[in-house]
């Protein structure tokens, strides 16, 4: 009996040993996954709730045999209490589930509290994932805050850090520490993606060049929810054989699509090309330094595309501005070579083209010289790029040779610095001539009859101007030209609502720093008498022009519009002639001038000639000229004094300083209060023009343009127009405004997420939007409703918008289907098609109204010339064999 038991035990041992060895054999020869995606998710900070959301997004896709998704997540005790509110560090194999709020993945390890800002923690995670989930391809995503060289957070280290761990004294990973961890791990990654802000810089790309093939990074900050993991991972799971280059492009594409291209940048960088970029940048830096052209860099500095961290500038745009502005052929050639190198290195760059129209995917550290950090180039931060290139030396020299205005960029109306007119604003600024020609500030007055005082304390001879931009015309309302270092001062009243610009101009070209202090103070009190009205509305400009162009005699009068809140048409001007004889001669010609409140000519040809036919009142019909005013206006008359009928006038009152008006049978009379000798009458019509747009317009095409319809005129009062966009088969509609100027808080454009006004409101817009602030809205379905309404009073230039149908990235089901990317996008001169598939491809471009405007056949990565296309949105159709890819192309 015991012998049988012993034999059974031996048999059992043999079976167990066999099973163990079999398992080892199977594990040893198991096929690796096609992709292992490692996500280093540092949520031990104020992004914790977004970290939980993103992990749940990954679970909606889940790991498969071909694609393993491994996450290391560290949490914080303060920001999110969901999922049991655990606060330690855990590792998960992401498991597919449909619960978007609860973490249900396979828990691999509980590590206790780990410092995610330490390189050893990153190294440990990489080694664990690689050992336990080997694959043919590896992607690493580093998730957390990213920062510029000078962080706005309370971080002492100024270099390009990521992964702040609040529990561990805000420790963080520097570029050098990431490089060190990757070097020790000896893992070569296909892709390293920074799901973080401001990481799309050449400094980071250069640091990673030996560790991965492609880097994904954003030049601008990222929204809290960052990448769209579900769509991206589902695509990879469905097509695990896609190349690294295609996956890198799709990471950029899905990110941009998920955020509707709103306030974002994102790019994929081919790191095999980054050395060439550095080489070409060295050539440009050398050309600038050898020719001592720091002044040329300073001249373009404020125009370079920059980001929330202002020291981060777009590298391609820097090269472009140097190329078009330099007077040295060697610098121009080097800049063009650098542009080409950047374009070749950027696989795909997508951005909000209103906010970042000059972004090309790769930024560089280029700070104001006063803000330059010596540690960047002296080796303190162990950043390879400045140590291996001439850029650090260039920045050091630039900082020593140039002083820039730290209130820049404000050398243009479009980049004017905003000041609060009612907040007694004080602004310090300075000039470095000859680079900085003037500084522009803008204020907004929201009330009638406002007053504004402006004080400028100066160390040298400066001039001060107050301007108003009206109908794209710049008008000088007031100025101060004191000599030497005497302070400049402007005080003005009767300002109407609207934007005004204050301009500070140095009189001398002094190359030393010239600081000044600008102080403004607005008031609602009307302290001047009516004689100031002409100054406040620019009519002094009209009278100066009138008098300076009169070689003989003339008379003019300022008229007060009795209904300034309404757009008024000047139908006729009536003149009174007591006689047709002057100096014994016969009839002669008069010259009639009319100017609006801004001092701009109202007549298309500036002047109208006429000959009086009889004594008494004579009317000059101006109806066909369509002359509209909303404020005061000026009428002036010239005559030759020899062969022109006499006209009575009171010279002391010819500027209309004491004019009054009265209504008489529908005609308004203006005349001097103490004389009836000289009379000019104006016949006005307050009937508003009909709205330029229709009560309802229905649109079904895939793209189109809508506007208030007024073109160069002002839109009409009492407008109520609607547009219904309904595109069959569309998943969403994007509406992107290209211009917007309405009466603020009174005239509105309202966009609804559906076919009528019963749908949810996507946005309500009124006032002034320009540049990066122009609105962009996207519907959740195939319909959108737009309503434009104006009140009965003031109107303005109006608005225009383009709508398009966002096209999802085409699915890729295997080797026989397309995997194409169109880049760069946006583009200006040349585009290329990259990816897999047939060697010969057909490209067709459709305009916003659906018209085919361009088509050609091209090979992969072949330059396609689009320089002849106007700027705008196009629908691109890429065709190869039986397959068609559609996407949006932006040409600028």
Image (cartoon, grey):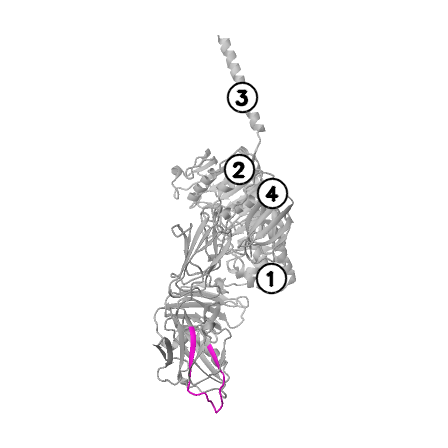
Which residue is at the front of the view, 356 or 239?
Answer: 239
Instruction: Find residue 882 and name its label.
Output: 4
In the rendered structure, which disc, 2 or 1, sits on the residue that comes first in sequence? 2
State yes or no: residue 882 in magenta.
no
In this rendering, position of residue 657 left or right of residue 181: left
Outermost residue, top side: 1
Instruction: Find residue 429 and name its label.
Output: none
Closer to the camera: disc 1 or disc 4? Answer: 4
Look at the numbered discs 2 and 4 and tell me whether their residues touch, using CB distance below 8 Å: no
Sort mark 2 into few (<14), some (14-19) or many (20+) by Cα contacts within 10 Å.
many
Residue bearing mark 1: 324
Residue 688, image quadrant: bottom left
Instruction: Find residue 237 and name its label.
Output: 2
Closer to the camera: disc 3 or disc 1? Answer: 1
Query: Would residue 746 be seen by someone viewing this image from the given angle?
Result: yes
Considering the numbered disc 4 on the image, is that residue within a helix, a strand or a loop? loop
In the rendered structure, which disc, 3 or 1, sits on the residue that comes first in sequence? 3
Which residue is at the front of the view, 657 or 226?
Answer: 657
Look at the numbered discs 3 and 4 and tell me whether their residues touch, using CB distance below 8 Å: no
Q: What stretch is highlighted in magenta?
A: 570-593
Sort mark 4 into few (<14), some (14-19) or many (20+) by Cα contacts within 10 Å.
few
Residue bearing mark 3: 19
- Location of residue 580 in the rendering, given as x and y in whole percent from the top left corner: 45, 87
In the rendered structure, which disc, 1 or 4, sits on the residue that comes first in sequence? 1
Distance in Å between CA atoms under marks 3 and 4: 52 Å
State yes or no: residue 582 in magenta.
yes
In the rendered structure, which disc, 2 or 4, sits on the residue that comes first in sequence? 2
Closer to the camera: disc 3 or disc 4? Answer: 4
Distance in Å between CA atoms under marks 3 and 1: 73 Å
Distance in Å between CA atoms under marks 2 and 1: 46 Å
Distance in Å between CA atoms under marks 1 and 4: 44 Å
């Amino acid at each position: 009996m015991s012998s049988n038991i012993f034999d059974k035990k031996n048999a059992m041992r043999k079976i167990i040993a066999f099973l163990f060895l079999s398992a080892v054999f199977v594990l040893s020869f198991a096929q690796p996954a096609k992709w292992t995606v490692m996500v280093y998710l540092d949520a031990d900070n104020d992004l914790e709730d977004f970290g939980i959301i993103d992990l749940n997004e990954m679970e909606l896709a889940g790991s498969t045999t071909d694609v393993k998704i491994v996450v290391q997540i560290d949490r914080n005790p303060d920001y999110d209490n969901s999922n049991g509110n655990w606060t330690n560090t855990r590792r998960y194999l992401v498991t597919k589930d449909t619960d978007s709020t609860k973490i249900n993945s396979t828990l691999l390890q509980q590590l206790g509290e780990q410092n995610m800002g330490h390189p050893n923690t990153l190294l440990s995670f990489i080694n664990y994932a690689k050992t336990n989930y080997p694959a043919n391809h590896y992607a690493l995503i580093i998730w957390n805050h990213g920062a510029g060289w000078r962080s706005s957070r309370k971080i002492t280290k100024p270099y390009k850090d990521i992964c702040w761990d609040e529990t561990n004294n805000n420790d963080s990973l520097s570029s050098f520490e990431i490089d060190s961890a990757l070097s020790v791990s000896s893992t070569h990654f296909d892709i390293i993606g920074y799901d973080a802000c401001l990481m799309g810089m050449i400094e980071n790309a250069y640091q990673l060049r030996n560790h991965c093939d492609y880097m994904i990074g954003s030049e601008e900050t990222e929204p809290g929810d960052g990448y769209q993991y579900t769509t991206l991972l589902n695509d990879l799971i469905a097509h695990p054989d896609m190349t690294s280059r295609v996956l890198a492009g799709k990471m950029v594409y899905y990110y941009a699509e998920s955020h509707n291209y709103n306030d974002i940048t994102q790019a994929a960088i081919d790191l095999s090309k980054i050395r060439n970029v550095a080489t070409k940048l060295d050539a440009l830096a050398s050309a600038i330094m050898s020719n001592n052209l720091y002044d040329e860099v300073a001249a373009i500095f404020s125009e370079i595309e920059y980001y929330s961290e202002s020291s981060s500038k777009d590298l391609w745009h820097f090269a472009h501005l140097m190329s078009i502005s330099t007077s040295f052929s060697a610098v121009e050639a080097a800049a063009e070579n650098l542009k080409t190198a950047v374009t070749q290195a950027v696989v795909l760059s997508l951005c909000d083209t209103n906010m970042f129209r000059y972004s090309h995917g790769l930024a560089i550290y280029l700070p104001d010289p006063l803000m330059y950090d010596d540690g960047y180039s002296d080796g303190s931060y162990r950043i390879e790029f400045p140590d291996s290139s001439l850029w650090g030396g260039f920045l050091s020299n630039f900082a020593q040779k140039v002083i820039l205005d730290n209130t820049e960029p404000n050398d243009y109306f479009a980049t004017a610095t905003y000041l609060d007119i009612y907040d007694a604003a004080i602004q310090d600024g300075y000039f470095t001539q000859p680079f900085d020609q003037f500084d522009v500030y803008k204020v907004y007055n929201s009330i009638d009859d406002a007053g504004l005082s402006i004080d400028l304390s100066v160390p040298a001879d400066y001039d001060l101007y107050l301007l108003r931009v009206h109908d794209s015309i710049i008008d000088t309302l007031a100025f101060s030209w004191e000599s030497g270092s005497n302070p400049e001062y402007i005080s003005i009243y009767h300002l109407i609502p609207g934007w005004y610009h204050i301009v500070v101009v140095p009189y001398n070209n002094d190359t030393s720093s010239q600081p000044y202090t600008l102080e403004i103070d607005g008031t609602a009190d009307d302290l001047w008498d009516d004689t100031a009205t002409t100054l406040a509305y620019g009519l002094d400009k009209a009278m100066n022009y009138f008098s300076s162009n009169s070689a003989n005699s003339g008379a003019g009068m300022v008229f007060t519009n009795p209904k300034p809140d309404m757009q008024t048409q000047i139908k006729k001007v009536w003149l009174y002639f007591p006689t047709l004889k002057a100096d014994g001669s016969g009839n002669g010609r008069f010259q009639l001038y009319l100017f609006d409140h801004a001092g701009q000519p109202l007549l298309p040809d500036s002047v109208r000639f006429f000959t009086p036919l009889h004594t008494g009142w004579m009317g000059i019909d101006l109806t066909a000229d369509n002359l509209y005013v909303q404020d005061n206006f000026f009428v002036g008359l010239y005559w030759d004094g020899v062969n022109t009928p006499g006209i009575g006038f009171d010279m002391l009152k010819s500027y209309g300083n004491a004019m009054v008006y009265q209504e008489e049978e529908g005609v308004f009379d203006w005349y001097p209060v103490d004389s009836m000798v000289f009379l000019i009458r104006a016949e006005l019509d307050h009937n508003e023009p009909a709205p330029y747009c229709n009560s309802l317009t229905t649109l079904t095409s895939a793209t189109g343009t809508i506007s208030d319809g007024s073109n160069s005129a002002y839109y009409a009062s009492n407008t109520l127009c609607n547009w219904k966009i309904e595109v069959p088969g569309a998943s969403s509609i994007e509406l992107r405004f290209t211009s917007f100027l309405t009466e603020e808080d009174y005239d509105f454009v309202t966009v609804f997420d559906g076919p009528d006004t019963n749908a949810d409101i996507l946005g309500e817009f009124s006032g002034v939007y320009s540049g990066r602030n122009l609105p962009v809205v996207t519907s959740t379905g195939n319909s959108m409703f737009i309503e434009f309404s104006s009140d009965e009073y003031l109107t303005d230039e109006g608005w225009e918008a383009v709508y398009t149908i966002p096209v999802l990235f085409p699915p890729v089901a295997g080797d026989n289907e397309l995997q194409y990317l169109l880049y760069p996008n946006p583009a200006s001169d040349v585009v290329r098609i990259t990816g897999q598939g047939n060697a010969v491809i057909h490209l067709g471009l459709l305009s916003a109204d659906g018209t085919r405007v361009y088509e050609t056949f091209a090979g992969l990565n072949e330059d396609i010339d689009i320089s002849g296309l106007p700027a705008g949105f196009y629908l691109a159709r890429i065709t190869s064999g039986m397959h068609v890819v559609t996407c949006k192309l932006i040409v600028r």
